[in-house]
Image (cartoon, grey):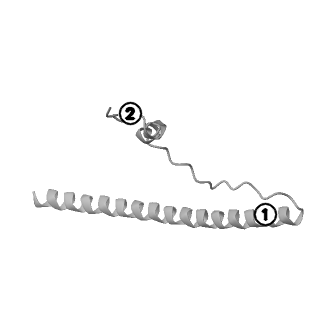
Amino acid sequence: MKAKKQHTRESHQECHHKWQARIQETEDTIQEQHLVIEALVEEKSSLLQTNQCLQEDNGAPAPFDDEWEEEPEEDPEEEWLEEIPIGEGEIVDE
C-alpha cells in the first residue's frame, strides 16, 4: 500500500512539474509576443510620422485622423422634451 501511495505521489509531482514547465513556456511566448507587438506599434508610429512629414513637404492636405470621437447618443426622453415649445400645455386661467 505504501509503495502505491509513493508511486501516486511521484506521478502527481511529475505531472505537476510538466504542467509548470508548460505554463512557464506559455508565459515566455506571451511575453515575446508582447515585445513584438510593442515594436510593431512603435514602427507604425514612426512610419505614420514619416508619411505625414513627406505629405507636408509635398503640400498635400493633412491626413485623415482615424482617431475621432463618436458623438454620444442623445437620450430619447431629452429629444422629446426639446421638441415642446415653451408656453404650450400651460393651464390658462380665464
In this view, which residue lies farthest toward the left? 1
Q: How many marks?
A: 2
Q: Nearer the viewer, residue 63 or 85?
A: 85
**Which element is circle 1 on?**
helix
Q: Quadrant of the C terminus?
A: top left
Q: Which residue is mark 1?
A: 52
Q: Quadrant of the N terminus?
A: bottom left
Real-space Cα separation, disc 1 to disc 2, in angstroms: 57 Å
49 horizontally vs 72: left or right? right
Q: Callout 2: few (<14), some (14-19), or many (20+) C-alpha neighbours within 10 Å? A: few
Q: Nearer the viewer, residue 6 or 57?
A: 57
Q: Nearer the viewer, residue 47 or 11?
A: 47
Looking at the picture, how far across and down is residue 8, in whole percent? 20, 57
Looking at the picture, how far across and down is residue 54, in whole percent? 84, 64
Q: Splitting the image into 4 quarters, where does residue 52 fall? A: bottom right
Q: Residue at x 42, y 34 (%)?
A: 88
Decide which of tag 1 and tag 2 comes sooner along the chain: 1
Q: Callout 1: few (<14), some (14-19), or many (20+) C-alpha neighbours within 10 Å? A: some
Q: Which residue is mark 2?
A: 89
Q: Residue at x 15, y 59 (%)?
A: 5
In this view, which residue lies farthest toward the right? 58
Q: Splitting the image into 4 quarters, where does residue 80 fall? A: top left
Q: Residue at x 75, y 66 (%)?
A: 49
Q: Residue at x 69, y 56 (%)?
A: 65
Tag of residue 16: none
Looking at the picture, how far across and down is residue 16, in whole percent? 30, 61
63 horizontally vs 70: left or right? right
**What amino acid does circle 2 point to?**
Gly
**Which element is circle 2 on?**
loop
**What amino acid does circle 1 point to?**
Gln
